[in-house]
Image: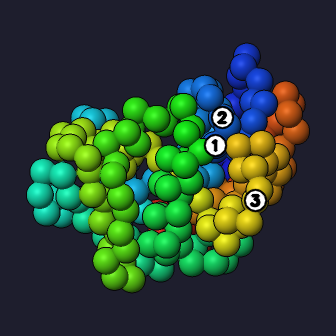
Amino acid sequence: DKTVLTVASNVNIDDINPLSSKSVYGWRNLRLIYDKLVRLSPEIEPVPWAAVGWDVVADDVIDVELRQGMTFHDGEPVTVEDVKFSYELFINENVEYFASFLAPIDTIEIMDENTVRFNLQYAYAPFITNTLAQIPILPMHIWESIENPVQYANMDAIGSGPFKMERFQTGEELVVSRFDDYFEQPI
């Protein structure tokens, strides 16, 4: 009958900005708030997540179909524009934590309202399991107007993941609650 899970850590969470978080410890928590196109199964196989699937058009061209009906924690829809914006933001801000995953990307195109195309600079076999499973989807309607996104305090942390942020205090606590509109409810 318990509805609250408390997890203690000997590592302080000092940053909830996806562009400046630099540790696996930070991402252990941020992945609850921010969704990714693909998740990995226990067998390290790619599982469609915010994407419902992908098509390898050529060795260096991958089309990804976004799951319909997803929303961010503020109720705004998750769109292919958000996906394109997120990947380009991480590339343009040269976010070191994700640099190796993003290096193969040449350009990103919106093909239709549900499909985004990744044009790679070269064939990159782990693109689906590495890149699509690592880069978080950020809400463009919030992040596009931020002047220095790497320095942004991000105290609201609006994502589209299974949990939404309730409050955060550096070095003290991160409190999240279940996002009831998420397509796959946590048990």
Q: Earlier in the sequence, mark 1 or mark 3?
A: 1
Within 10 Å of disc 1 (Cα), the crowding (few <14, some 14-19, many 20+) is many
Please name the residue shown 63% across and 43% down the image. 19
Q: What is the three-letter code of the residue carrying label 1?
A: Leu
Q: Earlier in the sequence, mark 2 or mark 3?
A: 2
Tell me where residue 6 appears, x and y as whole percent.
Answer: 72, 36
Which mark, by number, is residue 21? 2
Badges 1 and 3: C-beta atoms under 8 Å apart? no
Q: What is the three-letter code of the residue carrying label 2?
A: Ser
Q: Which residue is mark 3?
A: 146
Please name the residue shown 62% across and 29% down the image. 22
Can residue 121 be seen at all in this image of the molecule? yes
Q: Which residue is mark 1?
A: 19
Can residue 49 be seen at all in this image of the molecule? no
Within 10 Å of disc 2 (Cα), the crowding (few <14, some 14-19, many 20+) is some
Badges 1 and 2: C-beta atoms under 8 Å apart? yes
| 86 sits to left or right of 44 | right
Return the residue nearer the eye: 30 or 85.
85
Work out whether 72 lies above or below 91. below
Q: How far is mark 1 from mark 3, CA to CA?
A: 12 Å
| 71 sits to left or right of 4 | left
Count of numbered circles in the view: 3
Which mark, by number, is residue 92? none
Please name the residue shown 35% across and 69% down the image. 109
* Image-quadrant location for residue 134: top left
Q: How far is mark 1 from mark 2, CA to CA?
A: 6 Å
Q: What is the three-letter code of the residue carrying label 3?
A: Ile
* Image-quadrant location for residue 172: top right
Within 10 Å of disc 3 (Cα), the crowding (few <14, some 14-19, many 20+) is few
> Is label 1 or label 3 in front?
3
